[in-house]
Image: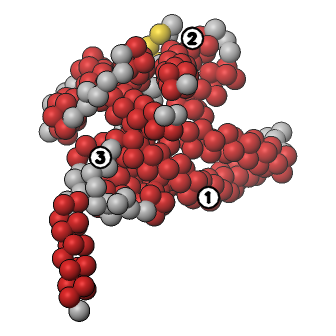
Amino acid sequence: MKGDIFKAALIGGLFTGVLSGLPGINFLNCLCCMWVILGGVLAGYLYQRDSTVKLEIGDGFAVGGLSGAAGAVIAAPLTIAFSALTKAWLLNFLSYIMEQYGGGVDISQLEAQMRMTSMSMTMIRIIIDIVIFAVFGAIGGAIATLIFKPQKPSSEVSLEAKTGSDSQSGL
Amino acid sequence: MVRLIFALVVAGAFLWFAGIIAAPLLKAGGHQAISSFLYDLVYSNVCHQQPDRSFFIAGEKLAVCSRCTGIYLNFAVTLLLYLLKPARRLNPSTFFLLLSPIVLEKGLELAGFSTNNLSRFISGLCFGIMLGMAFSEGLLQLLQRRFR
């Protein structure tokens, strides 16, 4: 019997999303989407752990892909929040520079322009992230099925079920 | 149907790799907006893009570093090979064999040994094969189940 694919994908996605959304830590994604692949491996591992049969590579691919897509969705609000903080800091810094040295730039106009540009850019980025994360997550999930084996072999489980039913019938 | 979908995915992988080469060519040709889109919005998500670790074309760095260039090149090529001749080839020993160059190289880097763009490109090529194999075999099996 196979485990819960959505539970495994969600936990893997949470791992991917949080680590990919936090500034500084997310830099490891530059190493071939490290957090995304590891999130896929984690999802594959959990799916395999909860299954009594050896999963095939297609199962790992599916759970990993789901975890990657979930990770991109979870990472998005974190990325938006942190980029808003950075933007606020940047605008304050620019206002300070303008006050000190003068200049022909209207800060409120710049702020409106930045808001519009960054919103559309963020949306495009989220869509790109969902595709990229799903691909790398799927690879991670597929790799997990190569590395991990079911903790309880199906023969052991069927034996347990058999003895359980025997003892029940004896009652 | 399986082959058609997989062929589209292979085309996507080659398009992704073409983007890596196109970004510097577009920048050199004066198409700032589209090259900036590729550099800053698409490929910055997956690579640090450091100039000293990148190959250059037409005086501009590629959209990803030398290691990632190797990875994406062989990822696309491996997918193409699976399209031409699908089979189950990936097993744990192949996986670790193809993973070892990148791990070894990263280990040497951390130990203070110097690596260059060529060595990074080669280790990326090996890693790209492994990623391509895992992706192809997983996707093909999933598609075959869906369209059986």
Q: Is residue A35 left or right of residue B126?
A: right
Q: Which residue is mark 1?
A: A77
Q: Which residue is mark 2?
A: B25
Answer yes or no: are tags 2 and 3 on the same subunit. no
Mark 2: which amino acid? Leu
| Chain hosting mark 3 | A
Closer to the camera: disc 2 or disc 3? 3
| Rendered-image quadrant of the N terminus of chain B | top right
Q: How many marks?
A: 3
Answer yes or no: are tags 3 and 1 on the same subunit. yes
Closer to the camera: disc 3 or disc 1? 3
Task: Give the distance between the C-alpha atoms of the residues marked 1 and 2, in whole angstroms.
Answer: 34 Å
For disc 3, the neighbor class at 10 Å (few under 14, some 14 to 19, many from 20) is: many
Closer to the camera: disc 1 or disc 2? 1
Can you say whether A130 is above or below B87 in the image? below
Task: Give the distance between the C-alpha atoms of the residues marked 2 and 3, in whole angstroms.
Answer: 40 Å
Q: Which residue is mark 3?
A: A145
Q: Please say if the residues under marks 1 and 2 sit with CB atoms less than 8 Å apart.
A: no
Secondary structure of the residue carrying tag 2 is: helix
Q: Is residue A48 left or right of residue A87?
A: left
